Amino acid sequence: MNRFTHFLKSTLILLALAATAPLLQAQDKFPSKPVTIIVAFGAGGSGDILARTIAIPLGETLGQSVIVENRAGGQAVPGTLYVARAPADGYTILEYTSTLAINQVLHPNLPYDLLRDFTPLSYSFEAPLVLLTPGISPNRKLPDLVAYAKSKPGGISFGHGGSGSLSHLSGELLKRAMAVDAVSVPYKGNGPAMADLIGGRLDYYFAAEVDSISNVKAGRLNALAITGTDRSPSMPDVPTMVELGYKNFTPSISWGFLVPKATPAPVARQLQDAFAKAIAAPAFQERLRSLGVTSKNSGGADVMAEKVKEEMARWEPVIKAANIRPE
C-alpha cells in the first residue's frame, strides 16, 4: 500500500508539473505585457519627441506596445527616482539625458546614483546645441552678439530651463568664452524660456536642434552657431563654434536608456538588442536626420556608462566656477 501511495503521489506531481509547464513558460517570456519608457521631463521637448519616435519601432521589435509616460518636475529627480525604485523586470525603462548626469554633480545627496542603481541599455542619440537669438534681434551672427554684450556690461540676458540645466550651463560657458557679463534668467522648463526668447525678452539661449529647427526655419529665431564639431545637415549655413574660434566649445545633448540595476541580464540583453535593431532601421534613421539628431548606438551599454562619466566630468568645473546651486 505504501508503494502504491508513493507511486500515486509521484504520478500526481508529474501531472501537475506537466500541466503548469506551459504557464511557467508564458510567465518567463519577456515581454508579456506593455513596456513603459519614463521621460523625466514634460511633453513636447526633445527627449519626449525622441522617446515617442523610438517607441513605435521598439514595440514592433519586442512584439509589445511601448508606452511613453512623462514624470516631469524637480529637475528630473523624481522621474529618475521612480525608475530606480521600480520593479527590476525590464518593464520600466528610464530615458537618460545629459541633465541626469549633471544632477549627479549638482545634487550631492541624491537618493540614487546613475552608475550604482541602473543598468545601461543603450547610448542612443546625440545632438549639438544651437545658439539662438530672437528673430527680431539685430544680433544675427556671433560677432554681433559679442559686440552687443560688450557694449552693455551686465545688461544682456540669457534664458534657461532651470538651475543646472544644459541650457543654463551652456549659457554660462558662452558668457565666459565671450568674456562678458550676462544675467541668467531661470524658467520652469525650456518651453517658457523659448517663448520669451521668441518675444525678444531674452538676448540669447541654447537649445537642442530638435527643439529649435522649426522656429529657425520660420524666422522666429536666429541660429548663430552650433556646438557640434561639424555643421548640421539640417542647418548647413550655420557655422560651428569651433569655426568661429571657440575651439573647445563643443557641448552636446545626449540621450540613452537605462533600467533598474537588478534587472535580469537576459532581459537587459534582449532590450539592448531591441534598441539596436529599432535604431538601425532605415526609416528611423531618416527620421533622426530630419530632427538633426545622430544615432550613437554603437557600443551600447558600455558606451552609455562612459558617457555618464564623461558628462559629469565636463560640467563639474562649470558648475563650480559659476557657483551654481540646485533650486
Image (cartoon, rainbow, N blue to C red):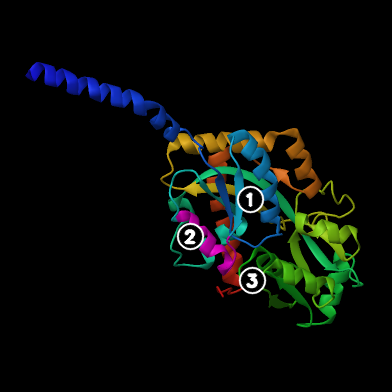
Q: For the N terminus, which image quadrant?
A: top left
Q: Verify CB contact (< 8 Å) between mark 1 and mark 2.
A: no
Q: For the C terminus, which image quadrant?
A: bottom right
What secondary structure is the stretch in magenta mostly built from? helix
Q: In this view, does 46 lie to the left or right of 1?
A: right
N-term-proximal mark, 1 vs 2: 2
Q: Which of marks 3 and 2 is in front?
A: 2
- Above or below, comparing residue 31 to residue 316 in the picture: above
Queried whether the magenta region covers residue 169, the answer comes back as: no
* Residue 321 locus on image (x, y percent): 60, 71
Q: Name the residue under label 1.
A: 255
Task: Let me know if residue 175 appears in the view.
Answer: no
* Mark 3 to mark 2 CA distance (whole Å): 19 Å
Q: Verify CB contact (< 8 Å) between mark 3 and mark 1.
A: no
Residue type indicated by callout 2: Leu
Element type where label 3 sits in the image: loop
Q: Name the residue under label 3.
A: 162
Give the residue drawn at x 61%, y 68%. 164
Queried whether the magenta region covers residue 79, the answer comes back as: yes
* Residue 306 locus on image (x, y percent): 54, 46
Q: In this view, does 313 lie to the left or right of 48?
A: left
Q: In which quarter of the image is residue 326?
A: bottom right
Magenta span of residues: 71-84
Q: Name the residue under label 2.
A: 81
* Mark 3 to mark 1 CA distance (whole Å): 19 Å
* Residue 121 locus on image (x, y percent): 54, 42
